[in-house]
């Protein structure tokens, strides 16, 4: 049995969207059980609108502490010991739940995840990862903001974690791994990148070398590794361009009568393209490299988005990505020895 | 009279595309004159197909030295003293030409530009900038790879240079300037970013603070400043997403008969959207912060793209962006004094 710990208070439309997403999820995964952390007075009436069978697999754990979107991570860590997202993570640490999910404050959730779940084995820096829709199926992109200036050793950790995710969750047998840089030539980029390149080159991973920004969505590479600063900005740039393209197209259709007619005919096709990138379908940033599963839903998501974040939490639990990371990383201790063991910078 | 120095040997389809682009440009700017650097045996026959009036304003300066796409910048700098792109830049330094343009090796062209034209006044790091099409007109984005790890002082230089470009070339009266970061809060990002934020905050620029990846194309900010690593990757990510969106849409139309019919009707609208972002229209990366105008055309461009790069070179010469940068930057010497003068890191 899989039991998921859900922060019901996080996100712009909590707890309504959380319960709606949960109801959708329960229809497809009736074998799961749920621990719901938050304000009982708000959660209970929402649950009462749901079928009896769903209510039977939910347990509400009441708490008054809530971490708001503006709460500083350090403050949350020190002072909000009963915050709903913290209790959800604690349930995973205590092995009461198999995985935690929150749509709340990203910085606080990441800091709490690291403190409560702790990094896996000798992993130095857990990372934030996301599935990316590409021209040829899905890829995984990390880090998206966990560590703004990672060391070369951290980049190697990301490669191992991304590879494990691609194998276990995306089902890719031998994923290709690329390191994001300003050019494909091995002489490009910072010393940190060059050192990571050399280590990855001699590793058992299917490393294809440096890749460029356009490769993030080309689908030619399954795992794209970068520092958290660049990853965060590249992802948001991609979202911005997609939105702009769709809104320009709409504007073109609306400038003439024939345009409106064509716009009407083309709408279902546009929807198909948009759905390919629908943020709701790709909702669920994944914390990789922790002792236990923690997934972060987008704060502004809808019920379908929360459903997909729950599905990602379930997939992470079910596919044992953490186990795969631990197994793979244990071989690196020896590999990194010549340049100073697993703690090498 | 404006005289432009053109490296005719750089780029994938040189010198053919160069001469074709030049012919297009000459039709609109018949008052210009051109110095053409490269292999006379290749250039001459191409020019002979052009009108007598164009030939009359062109002077071929023959050279055998060519910098290939794989030539290392350091090697080019040391050994290829008569390379076509070098001679073009030298013509600008010697005030024989008002601006230089090349579609050749970017790294070599940048290194040569810095060596031959030299940074403007007390500017420490010249930058690579590009116009960006957005939802609300054009903006300017820099640095795109000139300096991978700039100091906070360098970021301030970029802000001054981007502002000057936006005023003089884009014609924006009081451009808004944003600093790219992983969040809008002033507590986010590296110390370098935070220091640049503080300086820009108290500067005479219309600084709007930190902006995020999606703001690059939103059009809400006219000048977007970032380090060369992030800038290069964000730009290529944007290009990749645009290409992917268009190719997915095409694929949707081609899966059914009704789809093909709608695809036929929608083609002109799609072209409009694509043209909004047409790389040929936005061809011409601009070196900002040098003593003299140097523009870089994309190596794989077509004649229309080379035309636009020539137009950008002309606009840069005509609008005296360098003068505007020098004037604005001279005020910063005093402004940066409290934290150690213009050489502060």
Image: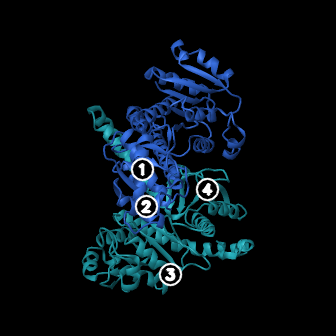
Chain colours: A blue, B cyan
What is the C-alpha distance between the residues marked 4 and 2? 32 Å
**Residue A31 x/y as whole percent:** 45, 21
The residue that label 4 is drawn on is B189
Dot 2 or dot 1: first in sequence order is 1
Marks 4 & 2, CB-CB < 8 Å contact:
no
Q: In this view, does B66 lie above or below A13?
A: below
* Callout 3: chain: B
Callout in the foreground (3, 2)? 2
Determine the residue positioned at 36% across, 81% down: B84
Circles 2 and 1, Cβ within 8 Å, touching? The answer is no
Q: How far apart are marks 1 and 3 (CA)?
A: 53 Å
Circle 4 — which element?
loop
Residue indicated by mark 2: A337
The residue indicated by pointer 1 is: A330
Q: Quadrant of residue A105?
A: top right
Would you say residue A342 is visible in this rendering? yes
Given the image, what chain letter belongs to the residue carrying mark 1? A
Is any atom of residue B279 visible in this view?
A: no
Pointer 3 residue: B117
Query: Is circle 2 on the same chain as circle 1?
Result: yes
Cα–Cα span, label 3 and label 2: 47 Å
**Is residue B162 toward the left or the right of residue A142 in the image?**
right
């Amino acid at each position: 049995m899989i039991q998921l710990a859900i922060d019901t208070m996080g996100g712009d439309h909590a707890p309504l969207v959380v319960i709606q997403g949960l109801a959708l999820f329960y229809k497809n995964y009736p074998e799961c059980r749920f621990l719901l952390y938050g304000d009982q007075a708000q959660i209970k009436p929402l649950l009462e609108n749901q079928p009896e069978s769903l209510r039977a697999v939910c347990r509400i754990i009441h708490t008054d502490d809530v971490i708001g979107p503006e709460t500083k991570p350090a403050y949350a860590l020190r002072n909000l010991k009963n915050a709903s997202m913290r209790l959800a993570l604690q349930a995973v640490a205590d092995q009461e739940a198999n995985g935690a999910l929150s749509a709340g404050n990203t910085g606080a959730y990441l800091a709490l995840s690291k403190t409560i779940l702790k990094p896996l084995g000798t992993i130095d820096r857990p990372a934030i990862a996301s599935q990316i829709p590409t021209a040829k199926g899905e890829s995984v992109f990390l880090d998206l903001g966990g560590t703004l200036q990672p060391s070369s050793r951290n980049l190697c950790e990301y490669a191992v974690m991304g590879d494990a995710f691609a194998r276990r969750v995306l089902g890719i047998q031998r994923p290709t791994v690329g390191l994001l840089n300003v050019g494909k030539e091995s002489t490009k980029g910072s010393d940190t990148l060059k050192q990571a390149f050399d280590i990855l080159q001699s590793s058992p991973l299917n490393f294809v070398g440096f890749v460029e920004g356009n490769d993030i969505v080309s689908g030619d590479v399954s795992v794209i590794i970068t520092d958290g600063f660049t990853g965060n900005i590249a992802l948001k740039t991609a979202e911005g361009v997609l939105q702009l393209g769709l809104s320009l197209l709409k504007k073109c259709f609306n400038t003439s009568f024939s345009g409106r007619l064509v716009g009407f005919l083309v709408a279902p096709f546009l929807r198909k393209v948009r759905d390919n990138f629908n943020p709701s379908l790709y909702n669920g940033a994944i914390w990789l490299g922790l002792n236990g599963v923690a997934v972060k839903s987008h704060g502004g998501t809808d019920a379908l988005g929360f459903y997909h974040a729950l599905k990602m939490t379930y997939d992470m639990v079910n596919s044992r990505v953490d186990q795969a990371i631990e197994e793979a990383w244990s071989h690196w201790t020896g590999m990194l020895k010549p340049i100073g063991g697993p703690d090498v910078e």
